[in-house]
Image (cartoon, grey):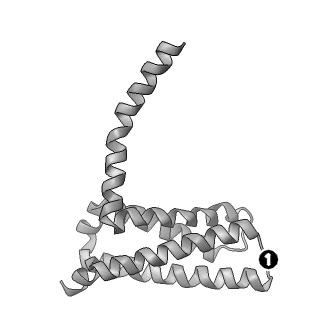
Amino acid sequence: MPVERALDSAWFQRGLALLITVSFVLNIAQAESLPPPGSPVSRVYEALDTAFTAVFVAELGLSLFARWFARFFGDPWNAFDLCVIVVSLAGLVNSGVPGITACRMLRILRVFRLFNRLRTLRLIMRSLAEAAVPVGNALAVVVLVAC
């Protein structure tokens, strides 16, 4: 399917990775600067967040269309993408609800979408996960010997 080939192409994946990275950096900048609500800086951050969310929703929709439901949900990373985007949308729609700030901070999870987008990062994460058990075993031995 041409849409799926375009979504899986290197240039598209790199472009999406760049957008995710820029979004991540802007979320950090917003969290660090804590602009007052309604200020010009706050409105710029909100507009950028809305734009990034719209791009990510469009990409998710294309991915869902290209891979249909069974293949789409067969990959756990796609389900994670869906959850992150739903949280982002909930934060945008319910921005006036008290306590939604904590929900909006979950937008920072967008950066983990990079692990799905870039094969080398996915390989690194898989290797780290496989190394976790042996490292945990070694830590347990050290703790037993030291105590």
Residue linked to disc 1 = 37
How many numbered marks have been drawn onto this rendered protein structure?
A: 1
Tell me: residue 41, above or below residue 33.
below
Residues 136 and 64: in front is 136
Can you name the residue that lies furthest to the left here?
1
Q: Residue at x 79, y 76 (%)?
A: 37
**What residue is shown at x 69% (from left), y 66% (from top)?**
31
Asked whether residue 139 appears in the rendered view, the answer is: yes
The answer to which quarter of the image holds residue 80 is bottom left
In the rendered view, does 67 fall on the left or right side of 113?
left
Residue 76 seen in this snapshot:
no
Residue 105: horizontal and vertical position, in percent? 63, 63
Residue in the image at 49% along x and 65% along y:
111
- Who's the residue at 36% across and 34% down the image? 133
Nearer the observer, 78 or 96: 78
Q: Position of residue 17 (x, y in %)?
A: 42, 74
Q: Quadrant of residue 57?
A: bottom left
Point out residue 29 in the picture as x, y percentages from the top left corner. 67, 71
Q: Position of residue 66 (x, y in %)?
A: 26, 79
Give left or right: position of 27 versus 126. right
Quadrant where the C terminus is found in the figure: top right
Q: Residues within 10 Å of mark 1 (few under 14, many from 20)?
A: few
Q: Is residue 141 above or below residue 71?
A: above
Amino acid type assigned to the residue bearing label 1 in the image: Pro
Question: Relative to 133, is 4 above or below?
Answer: below
Q: Secondary structure at mark 1?
A: loop
Quarter occupied by the N terminus: bottom left
